[in-house]
Image (cartoon, rainbow, N blue to C red):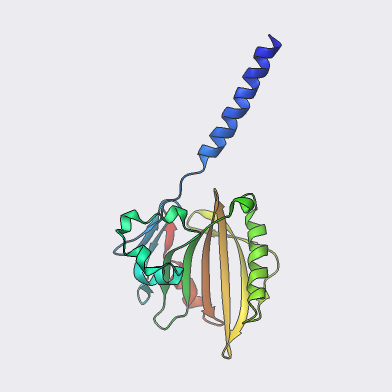
Amino acid sequence: MKKIISIALILCVLFGLCAGCLSAKPYAKGKLTSTGFESEFIGVRYTLPEGFTLATETEMRDMMGTGAAYFDLDKDLVDYAEMMTVYEMIALLPGGYPNVIVMVEKLPLVSRNISVEQYMDILKEQLQDVGVMSYTFSEGYADVEMAGKTYKQFTATTSVYGFALVQGYICEKIGDRIIAFITTCEQGSEDVLAALMAGFSEY
């Protein structure tokens, strides 16, 4: 009798573990629309505000650095779920700033248990290690509400050709992926950036 109970308990545990694995929804890339962008996986829609523009799929593919031959295939055959970094959307003011990049990063197997805060710690180290620019980071990680969800955020301030730039990193984790909204604007133009970000809404 004890043996039967033990086996039943093991099966319950295994079933619970499998259910936990299935609870993470599979990744599916969002799509550009006639008015902006939408992603069921990320849980957002974006309506492009007047005066701003969207990068095309081709421009985003170039940024991903993937071989052109790969994308010569039928777009329905491209397996974005296997790509480590996918640019979902880029919206910007003509001229460059402000802009927002929506990016999805697939975490390596050895890093899939890290928290959003740990990911951001690593990101800060990588930014400093690049060595091209020096960054000043905000302290800690703030909670920010956007499109019906709560994200973690930090800012990084740097200088490029005498212009002070402020970058914002707004992140969450879904399953084995980090969702990042990366904003860049010139210091003092935060109101224009706010107008750009107002296009986001809940899916």
In this image, 56 relative to 81: left or right?
left
What is the quadrant of residue 51 in the picture? Answer: bottom left
User: Residue at 31% of width from left, 64% of height from top?
Assistant: 72
Question: Quadrant location of residue 45?
Answer: bottom left
Specify whether 151 is left or right of 63. Answer: right
- Residue 4's spot in the image, x, y percent? 65, 13
Q: Nearer the viewer, residue 118 or 14?
A: 14
- Is residue 171 visible to the viewer in this orientation of the structure? yes
> Based on the displayed image, in which of its 4 quarters is residue 178 positioned?
bottom right
Which image quadrant: the N terminus? top right
Tally of marks? 0
Front one among 144 and 53: 53
Give the residue at x 44% y 66%. Answer: 198
Question: Can residue 56 be seen at all in this image of the molecule?
Answer: no
Residue nearest the viewer, comparing 97 with 47: 97
Residue 79: x and y in percent read 40, 54
Outermost residue on the bottom side: it is: 162
In the rendered image, residue 112, in percent from the top left (x then y), is placed at: 61, 50
| In this view, 11 is above or below 18 | above
Q: Going by the image, does 24 lie left or right of 38?
A: right
Taking the spot 62% from the left edge, 74% from the top edge, the residue there is 156
View extreme (top): residue: 1
What percent of the width, then of the height, locates residue 131?
Answer: 65, 80
